[in-house]
Image (tube, helix red, strand yellow):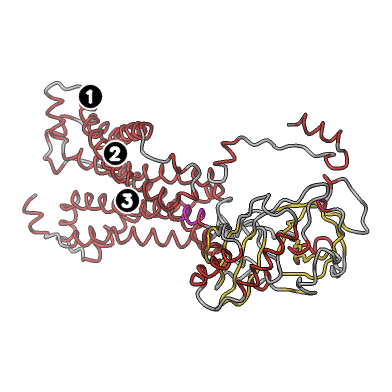
């Protein structure tokens, strides 16, 4: 491609000098836009899996303590540590495989829903499904999950002191190391949950900002439809212009229609970028000429989109091919090329139609051309549909336009009448994707909405798992400390003292996890920089909100075990002892 570009530059020095080629692999072109989001979601899945592993490990630690005497007897009868760990890990892996099988059944439904409702936002969605690779991956992950969750409990159980265990009763075995391990696992759960919640919070705020950002036009009470026209349908631009004039006249006469217009590419649908040459300034090679967004519009388009006319005039029926060329430009373009000057009356030339000089007759409001989440507003230039001509040295080729109809009634009700108006002029002309402009704009942020929904789902799941983890650990701890709590109450401890004791024991690892999670979320938030809009990845409000939410859930998870601890009967506990 570099060699071809060099030869073109030698053959056409005026048009191709200093122009090169950018080669992009097809795979990257197909999936490049969603890769960052999918990697973030993959990380979220991994975090949820780690939280689940921590939960299972905590449960297995409690279960292992209850089996200490059994393991001690097996060891006394000659079982080796390796044999004991093998047995315990095998039991855990069987549980994990059962969970993996159940997960596959749920995944089948989930994949079907994703493909059905989000196919347009996912590249190559037809190939998404459960196949041999997915089954193999699930099998491997299930086995590794079983090993990860069961290794620590199996190791702790296999190295227990036989003599000490056999001497003590089942409920009296020491477990100080186990308490520390369970607390550490809770810390990990809370930290990972906060990272996910922070990411979901940033995505929610980003989507909220997108939904409330000003696109530069009014999407309410407007209908849009695509009219694709074959390139060889009209031999001259006048024939195509005549078709559009007839169509717009018919549509504007429909009941409930306020105005109607057309454009070659609606905002967010791509479009043309062309070099321009400003009159009165030095002529430079095309490679050095500034580029702007160029759109062809009909009369009535600005009114139909509610794009404000800041100064000057709009296009009218007198702007025909035999009249001087005119253009409208955006505020950003006016400031960019004529800072401190009035751009009305300035002249320029579009490179691909260099035979016609065009004069700026109006300045209009800025419109987000590429997407709602674009950071900078484009420099945009509008040419009248009625003055279109073939590029210099080329024959005319027809092209389709996007129809925009502003209505006084619900826009969806006008769609059949608009289609009938098109077919009354040309029965063979297709009318594609008739939809409201509001739905069209909502569709443009469907990818961000998809990312937010999945990340929020994983965050909620992580929050529930963390709450279950805190609850289970604290419940087990209370059960192990019944004798201690009974003695405290017998010596005069009040209910509030017991509540404070249990709640503090539960909240300590949770608060430590919150601190670690905030640090981790701040460090990892930079990965999401390209996925958020209108909010900093270190947004204090988001971090405070998710921290308070997680702390509240942790506190609620400690209340039930704490209340259970206050119901301990001191006399019965001491009598049992």
Compared to residue 159, the image places residue 351 above or below, namely below
Q: Which residues are magenta?
A: 447-452
In the depicted view, which residue is nearer to us: 519 or 139?
Answer: 139
In the depicted view, which residue is nearer to us: 87 or 72?
Answer: 87
Where residue 81 is drawn, which disc sits there?
Answer: 1
How many neighbours does mark 1 have within 10 angstroms: few (below 14), some (14-19), or many (20 or more)? some
Q: CA distance from mark 2 to mark 3?
A: 17 Å
Q: Residue at x 70, y 66 (%)?
A: 298
Asked which secondary structure carries label 2, the reply is helix
- Tell me which corner region of the image, top left, top right, bottom left or bottom right, holds residue 486: bottom left
Residue 208: % across, % down:
52, 64
- Tell me which corner region of the image, top left, top right, bottom left or bottom right, holds residue 570: bottom left
Q: Which residue is mark 3?
A: 465
The reply to whether discs 2 and 3 touch (Cβ–Cβ < 8 Å) is: no
Q: Which residue is mark 2?
A: 100
Residue 148: % across, % down:
33, 35
**Is residue 63 located in the magenta-colored stretch of the structure?**
no
Compared to residue 295, the image places residue 162 above or below, namely above
369 relative to 484 in the view: left or right: right
Where residue 457 is drawn, which disc sits there?
Answer: none
287 relative to 30 in the view: left or right: right
In the depicted view, which residue is nearer to us: 348 or 535?
Answer: 348
């Amino acid at each position: 491609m570099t060699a071809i570009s060099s030869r073109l530059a030698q053959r056409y020095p005026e048009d191709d000098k200093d122009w090169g080629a950018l080669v992009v692999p097809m795979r990257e072109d197909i999936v490049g836009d969603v890769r960052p989001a999918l990697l973030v979601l993959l990380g979220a899945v991994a975090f949820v899996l780690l939280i689940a592993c921590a939960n299972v490990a905590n449960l297995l630690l409690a279960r292992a303590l209850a089996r200490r005497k059994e393991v001690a007897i097996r060891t006394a009868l000659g079982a080796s540590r390796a044999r004991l760990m093998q047995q315990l890990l095998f039991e855990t892996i069987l549980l994990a495989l059962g969970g993996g099988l159940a997960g596959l059944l749920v995944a089948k439904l989930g994949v079907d829903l994703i493909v059905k409702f989000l196919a347009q936002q996912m590249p190559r969605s037809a190939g998404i499904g459960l196949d041999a690779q997915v089954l193999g991956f699930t099998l491997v992950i299930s086995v590794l999950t079983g090993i990860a969750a069961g290794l620590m409990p199996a190791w702790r159980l296999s190295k227990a002191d036989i003599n000490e265990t056999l001497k003590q009763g089942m409920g009296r075995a020491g477990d100080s190391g186990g308490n520390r391990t369970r607390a550490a696992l809770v810390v990990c759960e809370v930290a990972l949950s906060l990272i996910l919640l922070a990411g979901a919070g940033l995505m929610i705020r980003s989507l909220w900002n997108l939904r409330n950002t000003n696109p530069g036009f009014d999407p309410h009470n407007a209908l849009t439809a695509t009219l694709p026209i074959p390139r060889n349908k009209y031999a001259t631009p006048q024939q195509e212009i005549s078709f559009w004039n007839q169509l717009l006249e018919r549509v504007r006469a429909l009941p409930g229609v306020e105005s109607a217009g057309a454009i070659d590419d609606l905002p967010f649908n791509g479009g043309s970028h062309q070099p321009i040459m400003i009159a009165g300034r030095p002529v430079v090679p095309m490679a050095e000429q500034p580029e702007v967004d160029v759109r062809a519009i009909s009369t009535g388009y600005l009114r139909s989109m509610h794009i404000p006319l800041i100064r000057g005039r709009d296009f009218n029926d007198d702007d025909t091919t035999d009249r001087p060329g005119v253009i409208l430009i955006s505020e950003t373009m006016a400031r960019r090329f004529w800072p401190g000057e009035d751009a009305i009356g300035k002249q320029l030339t579009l490179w691909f139609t260099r035979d016609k000089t065009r004069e700026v007759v109006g300045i209009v409001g800025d419109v987000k051309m590429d997407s709602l989440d674009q950071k900078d507003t484009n420099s945009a230039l509008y040419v009248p549909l009625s003055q279109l001509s073939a590029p210099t040295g080329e024959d005319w080729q027809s092209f389709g336009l996007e129809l925009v109809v502003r209505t006084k009634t619900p826009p969806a009700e006008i769609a059949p009448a608009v289609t009938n108006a098109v077919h009354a002029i040309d029965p063979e002309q297709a009318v594609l994707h008739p939809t409201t402009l509001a739905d069209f704009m909502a569709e443009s942020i469907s990818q961000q909405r998809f990312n937010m929904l999945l990340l929020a789902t994983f965050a909620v799941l992580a929050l529930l798992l963390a709450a279950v983890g805190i609850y289970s650990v604290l419940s087990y701890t209370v059960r192990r400390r019944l004798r201690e709590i009974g003695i405290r109450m017998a010596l005069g401890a009040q209910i509030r003292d017991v509540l404070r004791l249990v709640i503090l024991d539960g909240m300590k690892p949770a608060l430590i996890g919150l601190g670690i999670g905030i640090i981790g979320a701040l460090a990892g938030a930079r990965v999401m920089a390209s996925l958020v809009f209108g909010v900093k990845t270190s947004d204090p409000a988001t971090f405070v909100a998710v921290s308070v939410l997680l702390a509240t859930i942790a506190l609620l998870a400690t209340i039930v075990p704490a209340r259970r601890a206050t119901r301990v009967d001191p006399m019965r506990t001491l009598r049992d002892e």
